[in-house]
Image: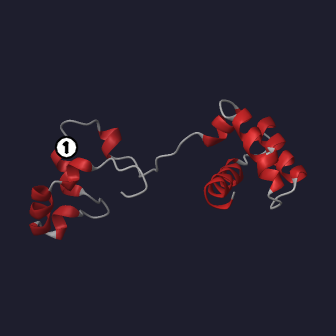
Amino acid sequence: MASSLEARVPLLDHRLLEFLARVLVNYKINGKTSKWILREAIKDWLPPKFLDRPKHGFTVPLAYWFRNDLAQFVKDRILGKRFLKRGFFQKKPIEKIIKEHQRGIRSWSAAIWSLLMFDEWCRIWWD
């Protein structure tokens, strides 16, 4: 995919796609089971717990990183003079967000990520 992780490269082989385009729908979906033919093809190699589990996204531990490994980076970027000098945000609310996140009172990882990305955008296009 253009801007995200793509982990299905083997499924993009044109010969496989051409074959699957000719396969009848009832082999692709069996009842509520999607990708039925794929599941049947690989069932001897994978344990059932991998074939029967529901979909879930690929996530990164932002909340943990912002509390630990990236804590100082977050403070330096979104409480730094460069960020605050732009005048878009007030210091006190950002300090509150960071403190609540650091103490585990509330996960502010999405807001912190947005502020970091806004800062990065400003560094590239605004400053």
Above or below residue 94? Residue 24 is below
Using residue 107 as the reference point, say whether residue 8 is left or right of it.
left
| Type of amino acid under label 1 | Ile
Residue occupying the point 46% across, 47% down: 58
Q: Residues within 10 Å of mark 1 (few under 14, many from 20)?
A: few
Using residue 30 as the reference point, say whether residue 97 is left or right of it.
right
Name the foreground residue: 11 vs 86: 86
Asked which secondary structure carries label 1, the reply is helix
Residue occupying the point 83% across, 40% down: 99
Above or below residue 17? Residue 64 is above
The answer to which image quadrant residue 48 occupies is: top left
Q: How many marks?
A: 1
Name the foreground residue: 45 vs 104: 104
Above or below residue 71? Residue 37 is below
In the rendered view, how is the structure colored? secondary structure
**Which residue ends up furthest to the top in the rendered image?**
69
Which quadrant of the figure contains the N terminus? bottom left
Where's residue 40, x and y in %?
A: 18, 49
Where's residue 109, x and y in %?
A: 68, 47
Question: Which residue corresponds to mark 1?
Answer: 42
Where's residue 7, x and y in %?
A: 33, 47
Which quadrant of the figure contains the C terminus? bottom right
Name the foreground residue: 21 vs 51: 21
Residue occupying the point 22% across, 56% down: 36
